[in-house]
Image (cartoon, grey):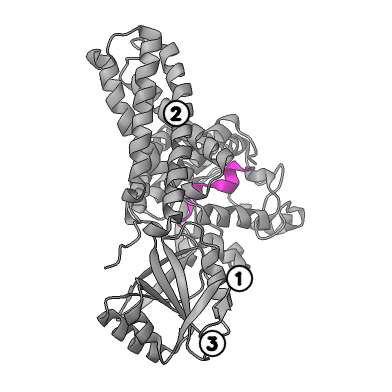
Amino acid sequence: MYKREKRSWMKHLDFTIVDIICLQLSFIISYFIRLGPEWVFTNDPYERLAVVLVMLDICVVFFLESYKGILRRDHIQELKSVIINCTMVFFGMLLYMYATKQSEIFSRQMLFVYWGLSVVLEYVAHCTLKRWVRKRLRNVKNQAVMIVVTTNDMAEQCIRDFENNRYREFIVRGIVIVDQDREGDVIREIPVVANKDNFFDYIKANVVDEIFIDGNSISENERMAGELLEMGVTVHFKLVHKFRMMPNRVIEECGKYLVMTSSMRIATPRQLFVKRCMDILGSLVGLLMMGIAFLIFAPIIKHQSPGPVFFSQVRVGKNGRPFKLYKFRSMYRDAEEKKKELMAQNEMEGFMFKMEDDPRIFPIGKLMRKYSIDELPQFWNILKGDMSLVGTRPPTMDEFHQYETHHKARLGFKPGLTGLWQVSGRSDIRDFEEVVKLDTQYISNWNLGLDVKILVKTIQVVVLGRGAE
């Protein structure tokens, strides 16, 4: 029997439980320090807040993926992660108190003491638990015995790759070379225990939990695996070296074939469902704002530049899909014709057009662009599903047709109203390659927490009107 690696939230259930305990302890201790020895759970408002605290922590962990790569973090990285996690929970508590109009009931001093204690206790708990988990993973008694079956030219590289996996749940006890007789040799301190002819005799006579098969022909792999499975041994097939593919991959069925699927970022159905819910809720709020903006700006647009209030343009969406994008019109009606005359003054290096004091923009259009009011109709695109709140900005058809191969990577995600490059400088970024770099960085590192961070930064950037043209 083989214990499959945990991939769900259960994988870090131990850290989740420890964090909840630490947060509750911090809450109780801070309550005692500020309000005395009265038991916290006999005070109704504080009792409710303690329960909300648990739900907030679970939500923060869910959105920020706080435990991703936790065993590989050093002390500084762990402290930074703990501070972010505890701070988000703290702000969640403040938001709860404001929304329920209970902010006057709770002691501010107690809440700030709680925040400081939660950081200290959670950080100490994480470091202690990680030390125990790492020690357990390195304990030989807890590790399965593995034999590596490979070819002579791949043996050393294969063992070296296993050595670099610090927190594996197996220990390599022997090597089987199938194309040469090297029995008795030692490769990187691992003995060659058998060859192709006496391999099964070795399995019968020794403790072997798992077999890793690398470097043999497909037909022989299948025959060998069949016999090994009959012996009750777990078999691992090498499909491809992980560094030859993108870091995100999953094994799945494609028709009648078992395949390894790789992409810049693999999202779970749960993550995509939550992202779509955020898009729908955000678009409904945004359309309400658009309605208000229409009443204010539509008459001014009509006065300064007779013509339609809205502007539509075919843009390129996910993986090259065209769609019609909507904006409030901020330019004169002959803007596209004038663009050709102004191309010599383009301040962007690459396939996007940006220009300071663009003469095609009428007066109120400059104000609308500064505060991104012209973008509000795109909430309709978001509600339809053409776009998302956060993503990569969709190029025009002309820009797309000039793309080089690596530029299309930025289209690997649904386009967004805002994105990483907008909050990293917006129009201050003049190099299109920098835009591509930021967009691909966003796609590769995407998670729900990153979307929330970008949305918060977007609000700051838009309110201050920084970097817009």
Q: Which residues are magenta?
A: 414-424
Residue 26 picture location, percent across and down: 39, 23
Residue 255 picture location, percent across and down: 30, 79
Instruction: Say whether marks 1 and 2 touch (CB < 8 Å).
Output: no
The residue drawn where x is 55% and y is 32% is 460
**Camera-side residue of 182 and 76:** 182
* Residue position marked by numbered label 2 in the rendering: 121
Q: Amino acid under label 3?
A: Arg
Quadrant of the snapshot with the C terminus:
top right
Residue 381 picture location, percent across and down: 41, 51
Mark 3 and mark 2: Cα distance apart in space = 54 Å
Q: Is residue 244 visible?
A: no
* Residue position marked by numbered label 3 in the rendering: 182
Mark 3 and mark 1: Cα distance apart in space = 46 Å
On whether residue 214 falls in the magenta region, the answer is no
> Quarter-wise, where is residue 92 in the image?
top left
Element marked by disc 3: loop
Tell me if mark 3 has few (under 14), some (14-19) or many (20+) residues whose alpha carbon lies within 10 angstroms of its own: some
Give whichever of discs 1 and 2 has the lower sequence position.
2
